[in-house]
Image (tube, grey):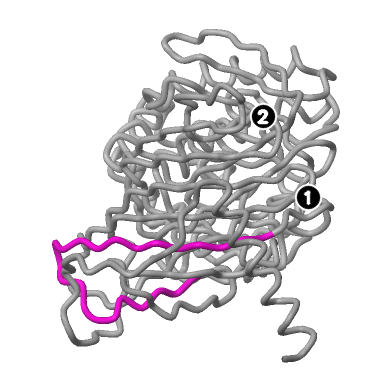
Amino acid sequence: MTRRSFARRRLTVVAFAILLVSGIAPVTADAAGTSIIPGSVNRTSLDLQATYSVKLALRYVSRWFGVDSTAVITNTSGGPIDRLEMNTAVARLGSMALGSVTVDGTPRTARVSDQTIIVPLGGILPDGASTTVRIRYWAHLRTTLAGSSWMFTKVNGIVDAYRWSPWVSRATPFTRPNHGDPFVTPVSPLVTLTVTTDRRLVIVSTADRVSTSPNGLIQRFRATNVRDVTLTAAPDFRHSSVLVGATRVSYWYRSSSNASLTLSAAASAFRSIQARLGTYPYRTFKVVQSAGGFGMESPGLIWIPFGIGSANLRYLVTHETAHQWFYGLVGNDQARAPFADEAAADFTARYVLGMRRGSQCSTTRLDLSIYRYGASCYYEIIYIQGGNLIDAARRRMGSSAFWGALRGYVAAHRFGLVAGDRTILQALDDATPLNLGASLFAPRFPSLY
């Protein structure tokens, strides 16, 4: 046995022992029935309904991160599938070690490709049938904010974990030349989460806390109708909140710098955007001071980076709040069609703040993936030019017809995944006798018109 093999084996044994202590049981074969039938079709799908039961063992001091996720997946795609593509950014950020993977209790040889865990089902799952998939892995949080590390790190006393729970997805490259979001995930009707820690931590998650053990080391959470579950933790998080209509808006933070301004900005943004785009579906909206890096969205929660100054704060909070509707409620392939969520969210933020401005880059097409825009102009093209195009549609249509069209778009695709950019453009075009497709959209979306 080589030294490297011995070290890997020792890591596996240690990780397994920690999982046992944390109440995460070993995977064993199960003789229960299965809906999987013999054969292969070389097909997977995003159109699957999955519920997730996840156990996380988190070691704050050592940064150890152990996951045991069980997904009950129903094939609603209209055809057979024989594999699953499960997303977790930890595969790229956390030196992830994949443990046992089972399908209906039977061990399967899964493999990690980029940020995707590819799980062969061992046969065909017919349309309408269900299967239970269990995935275990362990990883270590990073200690830097460089590159994309801020998505899975422990810095400034704060643990950040984004896209950490294996989730039904489509294989999508993580590496990109800009800060675009390389993710696409359908909504799950139910996620339960149990987090076991080595010390008392204040955990803020997309999911809502439902119980805490007497010693404070085991916390349980529950979420409905979400397309990912973010987790942020610190031993000394504080929070303040305000009621906006029926929704509790809260700000969780370690550093109190700009705390009152952040909460005020969040409440104002939430009130203004909900009035224009329709009812927010969750009882809480959480704004969390993250370890650093970029602002980021998750259903029911947004990250505002540690140390951000007051000059850009109100814009950033408002932009991330707008993502509760564009991406949160109406999902899309954020990597392949970033206009559908980023341009719509940025337009909304700048509209309610009165911050519209021109682009600092040459005018160009808006229908490319994040992989085809350079770092220097991605923001200026997709966010600024894209938002200005949407505003041009508003001015031509009139504000009343425009906001009615956007509300209808959100309502029609609530908790769904839209196919590319055409859906939002068509929703605007259908709400006016003007031919926006030919006169306004076609030059910027040559692949669609």
Question: Which percent across, then down, holds residue 29?
Answer: 33, 70
Residue toward you, 441 or 65: 65
Q: In this rendering, does residue 106 appear at all?
A: yes
Residue at x 61% of width, y 25% of height: 215
Element at badge 1? loop
Q: Mainly helix, strand or loop, the magenta region?
A: strand
User: Which residues make up the magenta segment?
Assistant: 117-139
- Residue 380 shows in the view: no
Residue 62: mark: 1
Q: Of the residues tagged 2 and 1, which is closer to the observer?
A: 1
Q: Count neighbours of disc 1 (C-alpha within 10 A) and say few if under 14, some if 14 to 19, many if 20 or more.
A: few
Q: Which of these two is toward me, 16 or 185? A: 16
Using the image, determine if residue 42 lies above or below residue 135. Answer: below
Residue 39 drawn at (x, y percent): 20, 87
- Res 294 quadrant in image: top right
Q: Nearer the viewer, residue 218 or 293?
A: 218
Q: Which residue is mark 2?
A: 288
Q: Quadrant of the N terminus?
A: bottom right
